[in-house]
Every structure is written in C-alpha cells, then in structure tokens.
Image (cartoon, rainbow, N blue to C red):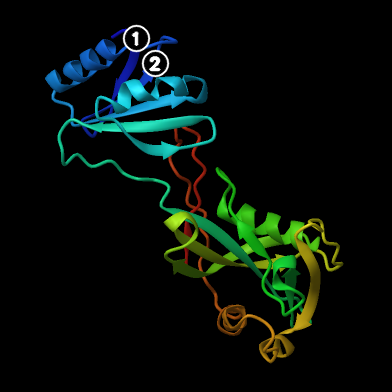
Amino acid sequence: MQPFDIRFDRFNGAQVTLSASEVSTPDVDRLIDHLSAAHKQLVWLTLAIEQAHLIGCFTERGFVFHLCQEQELTLVLRIQPNAYAPFAPTHTIGVGGLVVNEAGEVLLIRDRMMRGQGFKLPGGYVDMGEPMQRAAEREVMEETGIRARFVALVGLIGKYPHQFNKGNLYLVCRLTALTSAIEIQDTAEIEAAVWMPVADYLADTSSSRFHRHLVASLTSDAGLTPNAFEFDPDPHGTREILLTP
C-alpha cells in the first residue's frame, strides 16, 4: 500500500515504514482506514531521522511517541483503545564488577564525582546490544586496567525512580582477575583504583555503605553461572545467555 510498507505481526498489529520520501494527510487517513478494515489493534510506525519533518502528519491523526533511538523514532496508534504496546525503554542497566584476588583483596575504584572520599566497585552502564557479562569485563578493564573473566551473576538491585524517571537495574557480577597490575584506562572519569584487603574495606566508613554491604554479602555467594544450553538459532541474531544456580 503506497507510500507504506506494512508487515503484520502475530499480535494482531501492523508494523509500518515509509516507502516514499513524502507522505500526505490523506495518505495517513487511507492507512488507518485500511488497517481498521483489516481489524488490526495497533499500528507501529517507525520514522528515520531524515523523515522527522513528517511527524506532524501522523500525530495529527492520533499517533503518539513510543520508542526513540538516535537515528529513528517509533510512534504508535491504538486502533482499539485498549491495545497493549510493550514499552521497552523502562530501565537503564548497570553492572558492577566484584573481583577478589587470591590474597583476599577486593578491586575498587574512586571516580572524580566522589570528591576524594572512599572507594566503590568498578562498573558502569551496559551499552546497547552488549551482553551483560561482556559489559562487566569491559568496565573493569576501562576503570582499572585489570583483565578479568566473568564467573557469575551474584546480585540484582532494582531502583526507581532513577534518571529520566525510569528504573535502574544494577547487576553485580563476580569476575576472576587474569592480571594484577592496575593501569587506569579511563583517566577522565577514574581518579584512583586499588586492591584493598576485604576486611579493611568493610571497616572504611568513608566508603559507600551500599558497596561495602555488597562486598560483605556477595563475595562468597555462588550466584548464577553460565549454563551450556544452546538456544535455537535466532533470525535476528539475538545473543542469549542462560544463567543457572
């Protein structure tokens, strides 16, 4: 149906993109009439950033903003008022790396926002499309220079509200250090990185009570470890990992 490409999904919805560089209000009206006649519940419309000037044509006909990425915006139209549209970006996801060496020392960092006080676990946000275990290894490497291997997921903390009125999931990952020499990579963010005896860190009241609690309660926890289960091939190339006790 010109000027649209339409793909129906298994949830009685329609996923729409533009097959032309321009669209008119009558085009949008015909699209809505066509999908209503097909008894669809929900329309997903994705516009590339170069099509942003067309947004008004759709919002004037009842489309609302739903998902946003740097290069595209997805709007939805509920043909049936109670149609459910899963809202994906509800949380940010962060990882913390819990690394304890054979000498009983925990790997810690101080970032520049801590104003010279205390230490905490290395960590940061998971990048889009990045597996959780790789994010933990990357953050430890960037903030301390230590190469480490993911072993287990040992903690999960939920926080709401967080930035931009979304939730935050903080995943505490235990890693095994493969090297020992500290060499901070991200010097713009990280002020100091150290190996510190666990007992000394737990007694350091200048450090975060939250992070000290994580070290005290999770260091010996077996956690969830990678399972050898092989998922069926995914046509979208989704990377999956199964963690089990």
* Residue 9 image offset from top left, x and y in percent: 28, 29
* Residue 105 image offset from top left, x and y in percent: 76, 80
170 on left or right of 58: right
152 on left or right of 101: left
Numbered circle sitting on residue 3: 1
Q: Residue 100, located in which quarter of the rendered image?
A: bottom right
78 on left or right of 74: left
Numbered circle sitting on residue 103: none
- CB within 8 Å, label 2 to label 1: yes
Which residue shows up at 45% across the image and 37% down it? Answer: 68
- The amino acid type, in three-letter code, at marker 1 is Pro
* Residue 189 image offset from top left, x and y in percent: 75, 60
Query: Crowding at label 2, few (<14), some or many (≥20) Cα neighbours within 10 Å?
Result: some
Residue 173, visible in the rendered structure? yes
Sequence-first tag of 2 and 1? 1
| Distance Cα–Cα, label 2 vs label 1 | 6 Å
- Does 42 appear above or below 91? above
- Does 161 appear above or below 39? below
Q: Nearer the viewer, residue 23 or 174?
A: 23
- Does 88 appear above or below 144? above
Residue denoted by label 2: 18
Q: Nearer the viewer, residue 118 or 13?
A: 118
| SS under mark 1 | loop
Which residue shows up at 12% across the image and 18% down it? Answer: 37
| SS under mark 2 | strand
Q: Quadrant of the N terminus?
A: top left
Which residue shows up at 75% across the image and 76% down it? Answer: 101
- The amino acid type, in three-letter code, at marker 2 is Leu
Which residue shows up at 70% across the image and 72% down it? Answer: 114
Residue 235, visible in the rendered structure? no
